[in-house]
Image: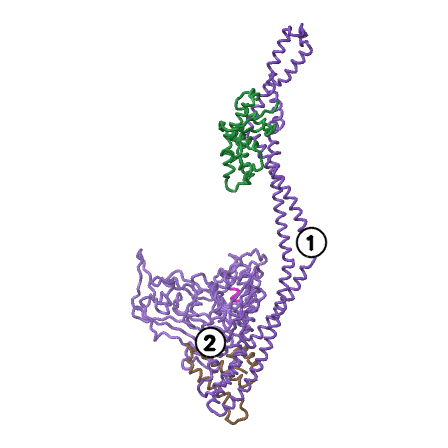
Chain colours: A brown, B green, C purple
């Protein structure tokens, strides 16, 4: 069940395209972040974007240990 | 009545005078509606034109020789000359005097020739060989109609 | 689906022509429509302005300041005139608009207050001594000159009350008000739910309006901006490890070649022109390499094969019996032309001959008539013909007897002794030589016969008829010449020369197709090679990266962002097209249902660049030439269409929905509007004329009932009415009030009216 602040149309399309659950969850959060940016006045600085996105990356795709066999 | 021998002045002869040159042009040039015609036909045409336009007959120069035989003029042409002579002299008896008839005819022809030549040689814009003669005919016909009304 | 949203109520205080406090409670969609009626200039459009001013501090509707008229502006101050006049100098006063919006199960109280200190008001004095209040130019909100805005006491505040809350709470600590407002009802979407029916012509003039509507309401703009940010995240910084960089570059190069991109990610094109079947089409170029090039070659091969087939059909046609028929027609026409040419020349010659030889008759008409007349007189007098007199004399002499019986014989043979005989001989001698005059008689007969007695016929036969014959012959000749020219053109199209050209084209196309197929094979081989190379390079890159932790982290991020970016890109491209087409098709469907004469228009398209085309029957794009009524209907259709694929919710306020609309369309709107946007709150600001007057007769729709739009709506949906009434006397003259009203039938006037509850 996804937040109603992202349209159903977009959600349905993403579910079609994105097979990985983690990726899908991350994309939803990324879109919410984008939505927050649009409501703020002025352009969001790149450093802020990078920081926010990095946090999400760490949350959903934490870097596996060096010798892990699960590495992509 | 016997045909008379019409002794015309040298002004009608080919190539010996200015008019002679112009006459040659009218009978040979492609722009002339008289191209291929006899000199006699041009003579009669100019004569009749001069009468219709009310021109005064002019005595042509008499130097030199040359003549046109009566056979060059068909019967209707001779009748034209006679009618003209009668109208000019107001005397029917002139018909019995061929010399006089020719004199009158020549006078008119010589008076009319220059204008006829110029109208053909220097026509109005967009005229054709036929349309020059057509417009002359229409002018004179209109003048007759105006006179009658 | 976004939350249901409605405007619960609007409260104005000393705003424009509303002196004091005025509150309007709007009905929900379940309850029906809210209709607020008022005459022109009484404050309808300012209600729309009030909503817009409160939410966004803008008043887009109605008159604006004209450029070059900075000191003689047309707009009125935001603060009510009576209020500011009554306010003492150096005292504070304010104007405010408050709106309650319910979104989902949360109610927002949104208020905007403008506070001023009134100093001495400034006026401009006219030539006749009258004074005009000056309005300050530079403020965002228009106030009288002499009033000073106090920013610290002017504010924009949003409070909210959730389902569990007892009272409204400030939201300032959580979000800035403007940002929160944008979440509730975004400012850049206000043109899609606050519609001014009188100013909609400009709606369709700019494709950006359509793009914003579609992309922002459907949130596609989020995908677009996310993709932009992800592109920045996908850049693998250089210089961290040279070997990694080199391998990465080589991998990228194989990708670029495969996708025909340059190192900056832009599409790469060759200088080679693409084949086109229609010379009038614009020139296009092939991509430089890879799959895009392969796709283009395949497409062109398919088009060429189609052209080859078409050529075969054309060549087949040209060998039909048509050509034999044409050739026969040519022979017949040439023969007719030849005959007509002869005829033309002959009639021409005859006419020319007549002009030369018969004209002298006309020229000498007077002379001929005179001579004929003279001859006839002489003949009547017995003078002519002379030969008759001579013949008579000869006869007498031969008979030797006169007609009186006297003898004319001579006594002797050698000389004449008879006096009478001598007289006759003398008479005969006198007239000898005058024979020539007898020719005049013949001449007279000839002239009479040929000319004098038949002048009109003479002209007709010698000039009129030949001229006509020549003209007809010439016309016929020209016609036949034209026919021959046409036949020759037809033959040329069918003859061997044209056929050979087509055959040559076919052969050329076959060769080109062969070459293209070979190229496609080469490209496929190259793609495979690239893929293998890429795989090997990746393996090598992985090995290198595993050794360096920093690079590992960067690469991990890069790879993840690249995957996400690709997903977003794919979703964006597909959704853009899907939503655009859905909005396009729904707009067209809605438009046809709302418009009373949909047959005028044939087709509606929103192109991929958001350019809009509304074509009539002659394929002319009428989108920039719509009437105000058509523009409003199309906008309503579009707004309804936007809602369907996006699920976006908004309350709709429409000012003057019927003002510029004819009878047929008003009827349609009155009967169909209740079905539109079934879950959205709809508020209409109308004039009484457009709302309660009977529908105007429409010759194209003779079955329109004699009833007002109000009753049409009333039969289908609940209506809550208000009237704006301007005071005409007393201290409040010129100011307006919003009062509840009822729709009633006035029996005296036999008309439906809105009357204010007393």
Residue C27 drawn at (x, y percent): 50, 71
Count of numbered circles in the view:
2
Q: Is residue C327 visible?
A: yes
Q: Chain of mark 1?
A: C
Sequence-first disc among 1 and 2: 2
Specify whether C492 is left or right of C271: right
Specify whether C748 is left or right of C130: right
Q: Nearer the viewer, residue C29 or C638?
A: C638
Magenta residues (range): C632-636
Residue C605 drawn at (x, y percent): 55, 67
Q: Secondary structure at mark 1?
A: helix
Name the residue tied to disc 2: C184
Q: Secondary structure at mark 2?
A: helix
Q: Residue at x 55, y 34 (%)?
A: B137
User: For mark 1, does the 10 Å Cα neighbourhood hold few (<14), some (14 to 19), or many (20 or more) residues?
Assistant: few
Q: Is residue A58 above or below residue C574?
A: below
Decide whether residue C635 is among the magenta residues.
yes
Name the residue tied to disc 1: C325
Residue C452 drawn at (x, y percent): 60, 27
Decide whether residue B25 is among the magenta residues.
no
Residues marked 1 and 2, same chain? yes
Q: Is residue B138 above or below residue C429?
A: below
């Amino acid at each position: 069940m996804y937040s109603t602040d992202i349209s159903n149309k977009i959600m349905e399309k993403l579910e079609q395209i994105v097979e990985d659950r983690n990726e899908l969850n991350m994309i939803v959060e990324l879109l919410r972040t984008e939505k927050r940016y649009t409501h703020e006045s002025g352009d969001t600085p790149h450093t802020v974007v990078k920081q926010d996105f990095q946090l999400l990356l760490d949350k959903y795709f934490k870097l596996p240990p060096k010798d892990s066999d699960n590495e992509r | 009545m016997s045909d008379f021998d019409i002794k015309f002045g040298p002004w009608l002869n080919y190539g010996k005078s200015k008019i002679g040159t112009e006459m040659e042009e009218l009978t040979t040039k492609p722009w002339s509606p008289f191209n291929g015609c006899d000199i006699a036909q041009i003579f009669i045409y100019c004569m009749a034109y001069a009468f219709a336009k009310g021109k005064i007959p002019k005595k042509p120069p008499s130097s030199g020789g040359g003549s046109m035989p009566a056979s060059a003029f068909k019967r209707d042409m001779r009748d034209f000359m006679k009618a003209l002579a009668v109208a000019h002299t107001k005397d029917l008896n002139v018909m019995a005097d061929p010399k006089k008839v020719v004199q009158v005819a020549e006078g008119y022809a010589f008076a009319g020739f220059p204008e006829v030549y110029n109208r053909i040689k220097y026509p109005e814009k967009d005229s054709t060989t036929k349309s020059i003669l057509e417009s002359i005919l229409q002018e004179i016909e209109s003048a007759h109609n105006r006179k009658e009304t | 689906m976004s939350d249901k949203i409605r405007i619960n109520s609007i409260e104005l205080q000393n705003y424009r022509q509303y002196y004091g406090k005025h509150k309007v409670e709007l009905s929900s969609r379940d309850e029906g429509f809210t209709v607020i009626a008022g005459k022109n200039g009484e404050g309808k459009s300012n209600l729309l302005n009030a909503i817009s001013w409160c939410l966004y501090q803008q008043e887009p509707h109605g008159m604006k300041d004209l450029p070059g008229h900075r000191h003689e502006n047309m707009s009125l101050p935001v603060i009510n005139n009576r209020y500011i006049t009554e306010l003492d100098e150096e005292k504070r006063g304010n104007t405010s608009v408050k709106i309650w919006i319910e979104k989902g199960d949360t109610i927002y109280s949104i208020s905007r207050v403008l506070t001023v200190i009134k100093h001495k008001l400034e006026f401009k004095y006219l030539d006749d001594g009258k004074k005009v209040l000056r309005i300050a130019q530079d403020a965002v909100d228009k106030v009288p000159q002499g009033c000073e805005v106090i920013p610290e006491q002017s504010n924009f505040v949003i409070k909210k009350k959730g389902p569990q809350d007892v009272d409204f709470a400030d939201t300032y600590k959580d979000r800035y008000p403007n940002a929160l407002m944008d979440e509730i009802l975004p400012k850049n979407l206000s043109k899609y739910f606050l519609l001014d029916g009188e100013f909609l012509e400009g709606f369709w003039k700019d494709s950006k309006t359509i793009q914003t509507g579609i992309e922002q309401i459907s949130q596609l703009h989020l995908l677009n901006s996310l993709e932009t940010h992800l592109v920045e995240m996908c850049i693998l910084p250089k210089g961290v490890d040279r070997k990694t960089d080199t391998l990465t570059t080589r991998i990228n190069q194989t990708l670029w070649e495969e996708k025909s991109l340059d190192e900056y990610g832009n599409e790469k094109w060759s200088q080679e022109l693409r084949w086109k079947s229609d010379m009038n089409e614009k020139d296009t170029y092939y991509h430089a390499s890879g799959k895009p090039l392969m796709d283009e070659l395949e497409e062109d091969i398919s088009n060429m094969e189609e052209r080859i087939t078409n050529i075969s059909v054309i060549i087949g046609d040209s060998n039909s019996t048509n050509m034999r028929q044409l050739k026969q027609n040519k022979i017949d026409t040439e023969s007719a032309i030849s005959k007509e040419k002869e005829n033309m020349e002959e009639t021409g010659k005859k006419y020319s001959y007549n002009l030369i030889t018969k004209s002298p008759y006309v020229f000498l008409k007077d002379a001929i008539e005179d001579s004929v007349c003279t001859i006839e007189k002489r003949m009547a007098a017995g003078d002519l013909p002379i030969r008759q007199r001579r013949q008579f004399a000869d006869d007498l002499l031969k008979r030797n007897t006169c007609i009186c019986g006297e003898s004319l014989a001579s006594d002797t043979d050698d000389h004449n002794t008879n006096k009478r005989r001598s007289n006759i001989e003398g008479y005969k001698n006198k007239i000898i030589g005058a024979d020539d005059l007898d020719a005049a008689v013949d001449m007279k007969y000839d002239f009479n016969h040929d000319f004098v007695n038949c002048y009109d016929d003479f002209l007709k036969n010698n000039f009129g008829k030949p001229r006509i014959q020549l003209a007809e012959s010439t016309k016929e000749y020209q016609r036949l010449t034209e026919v021959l020219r046409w036949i020759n053109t037809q033959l040329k199209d069918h003859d061997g020369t044209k056929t050979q050209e087509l055959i040559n084209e076919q052969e050329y196309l076959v060769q080109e197709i062969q070459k293209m197929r070979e190229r496609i094979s080469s490209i496929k081989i190259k793609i495979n090679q690239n893929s293998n190379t890429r795989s090997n390079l990746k393996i090598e890159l992985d090995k290198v990266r595993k050794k360096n932790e920093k690079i590992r982290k960067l690469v991990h991020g890069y790879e993840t962002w690249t995957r996400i970016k690709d997903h977003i890109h794919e979703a964006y491209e597909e959704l853009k097209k899907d939503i655009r087409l859905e909005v396009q098709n729904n707009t067209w469907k809605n438009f046809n249902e709302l418009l009373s004469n949909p047959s005028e228009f044939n087709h509606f398209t929103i192109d991929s660049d958001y350019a809009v085309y509304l074509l009539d029957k002659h394929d002319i794009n009428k989108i920039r030439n719509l009437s105000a009524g058509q523009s409003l209907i199309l906008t309503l259709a579009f707004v309804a269409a936007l809602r369907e694929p996006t699920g976006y919710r908004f309350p709709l306020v429409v000012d003057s929905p019927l003002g510029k609309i004819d009878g047929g369309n008003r009827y349609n709107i009155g009967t169909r509007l209740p079905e539109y946007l079934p879950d959205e709150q709809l508020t209409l600001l109308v004039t009484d004329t457009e709302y309660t007057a009977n529908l105007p007769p429409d010759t194209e729709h003779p079955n329109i009932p004699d009833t007002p739009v109000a009753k049409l709506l009333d039969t289908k949906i609940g209506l809550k009415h208000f009237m704006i009434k301007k005071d005409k006397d007393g201290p409040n003259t010129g100011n307006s009030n919003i009062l509840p009203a009822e729709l009633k039938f006035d029996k005296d006037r036999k008309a439906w009216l809105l009357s204010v509850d007393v």
